Amino acid sequence: MAFAGKYEFESDENYDEFVTKIGLPSDKIEMGRNCKIVTEVVQNGNDFTWTQHFPGGRTTTNTFTIGKEAEMETMGGRKFKATVKMEDGKIVADFPNYRHTSEISGGKLVEISSSSGVVYKRTSKKIA
């Protein structure tokens, strides 16, 4: 599956319930609500650089290779190690307190995070 491109936030579902469940502090919750995040994905085979640009100039970048352990950063800024997998065309990563999947569906980037039965879905449209 080709993920490369630049994607802009379009919609999300269950944001507040999910980020509360995973314990994000209230200032980070407020900052992320309806945030026009731009996600930029550079893909070279199984090697990825996944950058999220937030309003105000803050960015988070995770660089990983499918099937190999990499240092990653959570939504809340916590660093951890994970092995990112590819399952049925979806990128899958187990973060410390949630599971995250990313896929291209209908030309859009669809990201789903789940924690203890609470599911957060973010959809972004391709802009480049």
Image (tube, rainbow, N blue to C red):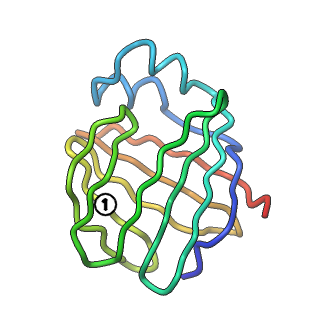
Q: Nearer the viewer, residue 115 or 59?
A: 59
For disc 1, the marked residue is 93
For residue 77, side relative to residue 90 (left or right): left
How many numbered marks are there? 1
Q: Residue reaching furthest top?
A: 26
Q: Position of residue 17 (x, y in %)?
A: 40, 25
Determine whether 12 is above or below 50 in the image: above
Quarter of the image where one finds residue 10: top right
Q: Nearer the viewer, residue 22 or 44?
A: 44
Residue at 67% over, 44% down: 9
Q: Which amino acid lies under the numbered mark 1 shown in the image of this protein?
A: Ala
Q: Residues within 10 Å of mark 1 (few under 14, many from 20)?
A: some
Q: Residue reaching furthest right?
A: 127
Q: Position of residue 67 (x, y in %)?
A: 26, 78
Quarter of the image where one finds residue 81: bottom left
Residue at 73% over, 55% down: 125
Q: Nearer the viewer, residue 128 or 49?
A: 49
Determine whether 52 is above or below 70 in the image: above
Q: Position of residue 113 (x, y in %)?
A: 39, 47
Q: Secondary structure at mark 1?
A: strand
Residue at 45% over, 13% down: 27
For residue 38, side relative to residue 33 (left or right): right
Determine whether 55 is above or below 41 in the image: above
